[in-house]
Each structure stands twice: as C-alpha cells, then as structure tokens.
Amino acid sequence: MLTNCSAAKGGRAADVSHHCRRQVSLQTSGIAADVRYRCRRQVSLQTSGIAADVRYRCRRQVSLQTSGIAADVRCHCRRQVSLQTSGIAADVRYRCRRQVSLQTSGIAADVRYRCRRQVSLQLSAITADVRYRCRRQVSLLTSGIAADVRYRCRRQVSLLTSGIAADVRYRCRRQVSLQTSGIAADVRCHCRRQVSLQTSGIAADVRYRCRRQVSLQTSGIAADVRYRCRRQVSLQLSAITADVRYRCRRQVSLLTSGIAADVRYRCRRQVSLLTSGIAADVRYRCRRQVSLQTSAITADVRYRCRRQVSLQTSGIAADVRYRCRRQVSLQTSGIAADVRYRCRRQVSLLTSGIAADVRYRCRRQVSLQTSGIAADVRYRCRRQVSLLTSGIAADVRYRCRRQVSLQTSGIAADVRYRCRRQPSLQTSVSLQTSGIAADVRYRCRRQVSLQTSGIAADVRYRCRRQVSLQTSGIAADVRYRCRRQVSLQTSGIAADVRYRC
C-alpha cells in the first residue's frame, strides 16, 4: 500500500494500514530506510513532581510532559489519530470507543457510536469517512482531506492538560494525527481509534464500536485514563500523579517530505526519519512509530496493530509498513540505513550520512534524568522510560527491549545485537545523581551509549545494561528483564554491534 503521507500538494492517497499500533515519524526527505523492528519501546517521562505508576505490558511510549495532573491513564487498546492535514479523503473506521468532537462547520458527519465516543470535527468541507473498529480518535485538523484512516488497533492519547481529574477509560483506542496537506490517506484501524476531525467541509462517517474520549486539553481534570493495549500518553504537564498503564500502543507521525520510505514494522517501533536524502527501508514487524515529517514521501504505511499516524507532511508517497508497534526516529540526512529490529527498539538516527545497519533483537534504554521522582514505571514488553523530570521516585521496571538512539553523524554502523550491552563505552552505570536510592535490576541487555567518535566498535552483549541515572533525589527502582537502550551518540562510527537478545 502506498501512503501519500502529508503532501503540501493536496489529495495524496495514503494507505496507512495498522496491524499493530505504530507511530512513524519520517521527518526526513529522500529516505529509503530499511528499518526492521521486531520488538521495542520508548517511554519518556519528561515531567516534574511525578509520582507516576507507569506500567507497561506491551510496548508503550509514555511521555509525561504535563503538569498538575492526577491522571489515572489506563489503556486496553487505544490510539489517537489526529488528521491535521488538508485534502485528505480520510476513511477513519473505528471499532471501539472514540471521542469525536464535532467542532466544525459545514460537516455532514455520520457519527456512529457503538461504544461511547466523542469526535471533535473542528473542520469544514471534509469528506471524511471516519470508521472506528476499535477505539480511536482521529483529529483531522486539515481541510479538504479525503483520508482513509483505518485502524486495527489502538492509538495514542495525549493528555496535554493541567489539573485534570479525568476518568478516561480506554479499551482499545488510538489517535492518529494527520497533520499533512493533500493526503488521501488510507489509515485502517482494527482496534479503537479516536478521530478528532478538526477540519472543514467534512462528510465524516465516524463509526464507533467502543468508547473513547481522547484529548483532554482541559484544566482541573483528575483523569483516569486506563490503557490495556498500545498507548502513548504524553503528559506534558508537571506535578502529575499519573498511573499510565500500557499494554500495546503506538503512534505514527508522518512529518516527512520526499521520502520513498519502506517502513516495515515487525515489533513495536517508532521510526522518526528526521533526515534528508535517505533511501531508508524501514520495515517493522511489531509496533512502530514512524513520523513522516517530510514532503513528497511515497509512504506505504501499513499497520497491523495499533498505530497513530500523524501525516504532517506534504507530497509523501511513503511505504510505511508496520507489523508491530515501533518508533524509529531517523533524524539524519543522507542515510541509507538498514535498521532491522526483531524485538522492540527505538532507534533514533540523529545523524547525517549514515549507512547504518542497526539490527536489534532485544534492547532498551532507561534514561533517568530526573530528580525526586517517585515513578513506578513497569514494563513488561519493550519500553523506553526517560525520566527527564524532577521530584520523581521512579520505579522503572523493564521486561523487554529498550530504545536505541543513534545520534551520530557519518556513521556506517553495522549494529548487530545478539545478547549484549555496553558495560561502558563512555560510562558503565553512571549515577550522576544525588540522593538516589536506585534499585536497578537488569536481567537482559541494557543501555549502550556510544558517545564516541570514529569508533569501529564491535560491541557484543549477551546480558548487560547501562543505566545512567543523571537525576537527583531519585528513589528509582529500575528493573529490567530484557533489553535496554543503546544510544549511539557517536560520529563516524562503523560499529558492528550485534545483539541477539
């Protein structure tokens, strides 16, 4: 399927099929990246004063960037899809609950709920066929969208609110933000989607099977958002007492241009291709997030499980294929990256000129760059929890695979993992914090930060991890069971890092 993800030219036909929730941010141009994931996750807790109980069962990204939230965010299977594009003929089909707020004008909205949903259609003149099979929110913040957004599994919920006492219970829901123009996106959802059609001229067929309320952009809410499957909850607030429980969820933002990206997911991954001139073949098997923030992408975004696809791009014909949720952020230029994941990983290629063959099977990163965190972040499968917050006593428990951020330039990195981690390629466990009572338990693979230059490193790990607790006042219980983050923040590395687990 080809997905003309976000075209500034109008009327692209994006076939975004979700099997497992994924966000694919292809913020690059000219990328043909082969990023194959099998399992991986990221959770960035960039909050302050959070007593967050973030429990993951299967891959999730939880960014708690919020303030003043006592949010109990429990998700079963959910996704948020914000279609902020123009010229999209969106077929957004929901099966389970969705919230659609129809705040638009000139809408011939067919809002069918089977399980409670609110769909906010803040658009006009959209002929959106928003069909939910499982809870989804799709916010179509665009005009002239003929977006076929079909969800199979659940989507992201961004709680960008303050003081929320909201009881938002999700079973399978997702948000897909298509912030592109001229997209004829075929986003197919199997499980719950929230579609907020904030566009104009929408003849939206919003069919809900199960209930969803997504986008609590309010204040004074004590939100109980319960997730069971794939969810991204970005709590961009402070003083959050968030109980964010994920089971399986993903987001895909296609913010790229000029990408002929074959993004195939096998296990949950987020692939953000923030690069230009990349011939990236990004293949996911399990959940992946691919944000295509580029233009002129020939993106075939196929989801098998819950995915959020935000097509914030123009002229994209991106072939983004997901099988299971993954996010890979390729923030590089001129990369012919063959990034293959087998178990949940996030690989952020923040480099330029990389011909990186990054093959992951199991790995994870936990960067606890927070202070005073009392966060109970429990992972069962693939998670990255970056606690960039203050006042958190974080209990970060990982079971499987972590993030790999390749923030390097000019790397021809063949990073193959079998079962290993970097005890330290600049630091082994660097506890650069004060007052930390850190219970860091690793079972398999930990973070490898390759903050070096000109390394032809063959880093083979079998069972090990690096946890950099760059926080203060943290009583962090970081328990890992399987694979952690490998951040390759190096330049000019021809790294052969082979992982098996």
Image: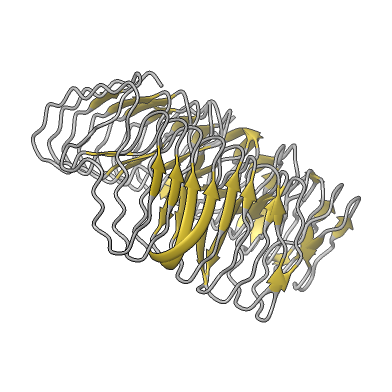
Residue at 59% across / 59% down in the picture? 86
Is residue 403 positioned above or below 107 on the image?
Answer: above
Left or right side of 35 for 414: left
Is residue 360 positioned above or below 246 on the image?
Answer: above
- Quadrant where the image shows the N terminus: top right
Residue 282, can we see it?
yes
Residue at 18% across / 43% down in the picture? 427
Who is closer to the viewer here, 59 or 32? 59
Q: Position of residue 285 (x, y in %)?
A: 54, 25
How many numbered dots are placed on residues in this image? 0
- Quadrant where the image shows the C terminus: top left
Q: Position of residue 89 (x, y in %)?
A: 69, 50
Who is closer to the viewer here, 269 or 126? 269
Residue at 42% across / 54% down in the picture? 476
Q: Quadrant of residue 95?
A: top right
Left or right side of 211 for 49: left
Left or right side of 406 for 443: right
Q: Position of residue 317 (x, y in %)?
A: 49, 39
Who is closer to the viewer here, 191 or 9? 191
Who is closer to the viewer here, 214 or 206? 214
